[in-house]
Image (spheres, rainbow, N blue to C red):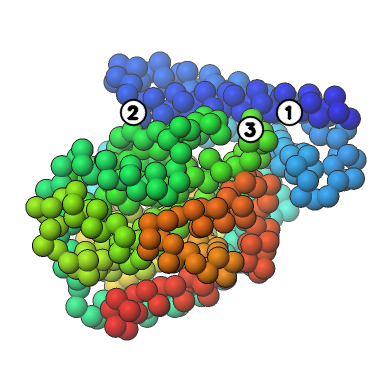
Amino acid sequence: MKDQLIELKRRLMEIDDLNAIAALLNWDQSTYMPPGGAAARGRQAATLGRLAHEKATDPAIGRLLDALQPYADSLPYDSDDASLIRVARRNYERAIKVPPEFMGRFFAHSAGSYDLWTRARPANDFSLVQPCLEKTLDYSRELANFFPGYDHIADPLIDFSDYGMKAASVRAVFAELRSQLVPLVEAITARPTPDDACLHQHYPEDRQLAFGVNVIKRFGYDFRRGRQDKTHHPFMTKFSLGDVRITTRVKEDDLGEALFSTMHEAGHAMYEQGVSMDYEGTPLADGASAGVHESQSRLWENIVGRSLAFWQHFYPELQATFPDQLGAVSLDTFYRAINKVQRSLIRTDADEVTYSLHVIIRFDLELDLLEGKLAVKDLPEAWRARYASDLGVAPPDDRDGVLQDVHWYAGTIGGAFQGYALGNIMNAQFYEAALKARPSIPDDIARGQFDTLHGWLKDTIYRHGSKFTATELLERVTGGPLDVGPYIRYLRAKFGALYGV
Ligand code: ZN
């Protein structure tokens, strides 16, 4: 048994090595690669992807997993070995169910679709991508149907990023969240809009970057096992548990851009840096799900980084960094500016209160498309109708409407969006549990001390990696299932005080 486990781990580490090398090539492409490298880099990434897929679907892995199953069954569910065998089996069975021939066709289609989208969006012309998107919907259904026995056709697609979450239960939770958020947004936006002009002065890049780095070092992001570079779109990437990198984007006329994206990506990275070193090179060295990952980034960005307690400590440092810009701006004005709520068109620019509504709209439309209730040709109109009813804004064109996000144009329809809103719901659940266990956290944050919160997160969430599913983790940490209650309570308390509603 021991030899078989060693052999399984050796094979899994080879797959992990190939994936990590691919991630490194991708990081290089996004940061420092000269444009001349693009063609060869695409080929190199495809070669690595093919090799990793071959290794991940090698029948020898299936035989090892079968041989090890009695051993796994003899162990407690949460033991490291049983969890490794369980997660490795899940990945293996998922990989072998999708024929390589399909993946080849789908990747070629996605590349063409993405290319069309890069032209359709600036041209504000949905008709350019419509036929292609219709094929994407067919491909998405075809992919889901490699996993028969589902309750809803979106379930297998959701499993790829948020394993175990079901369309029906997510839809119900989102419906409840929506019913609470729509009136809250109405009440807030009926109040005077805060002036955020203080954020839109000239802020030199070098000082912005230095301030952000100082903040995330204090959070606990470990620069001996990470680094930060600049990219067009900020992201986190991992090559090993000893090398978890982030990127950020600076706008010299918008102080919030780099600062909050740095906190966000550091939240993702601290999660990965906190995974138990025992899991290095195995499928357990990963986050539990897209939603749980997003809960960790948003916890540091929003619950901590946009809190009054945080800025009571850090605002004097920020003023000292930018004395000309902020020397005469009060903490109250600054705090209101970074928490400005507005009805808006663009998901990625949305504030804490409206953000989930943007996501729920996309999730509902995905389900309608997959169920055949909505035709692709009617999607732009359905998009406008939902923005009008949920957010009270009407996109003047498709560029800032149905064409704004890349997801449907470079991947499947279904499974891509729910994690963003699940993250908001879960981060409030986790934070409520953290406060119950460590009541000093808010006072510690106000003193610029984050060890209490970071230590609790490492202990209860980070170190487990992907040992538990999101649902299991919620049960273990909060004692219950996915629940919008804590998130709504958090929003009502914070924005109720800010806006007097
Ligand atoms: Zn994120």
The quarter of the picture where the C terminus appears is bottom left
Q: Which secondary structure, mark 1? A: helix
Residue at numbered disc 1: 9
Seen from the viewer's position, the closer of residues 1 and 412 is: 1
Q: Residues within 10 Å of mark 1 (few under 14, many from 20)?
A: some
User: Amino acid type of disc 3?
Assistant: Glu
The part of the image, by quadrant, that contains residue 388 is bottom left
Seen at 39% across and 48% down, the residue is 218
Q: Verify CB contact (< 8 Å) between mark 1 and mark 2.
A: no
User: Amino acid type of disc 1?
Assistant: Lys
Q: Which numbered circle lies on residue 280? A: 3
Residue at numbered disc 2: 31
The part of the image, by quadrant, that contains residue 85 is top right
Seen at 48% across and 64% down, the residue is 441
Outermost residue, front side: 447
Residue 213 horizontal/vertical position (percent):
33, 42
Marks 1/2: CA–CA distance = 32 Å
Residue 31 horizontal/vertical position (percent):
33, 28
Outermost residue, bottom side: 501
The part of the image, by quadrant, that contains residue 310 is bottom left
Q: How many marks?
A: 3
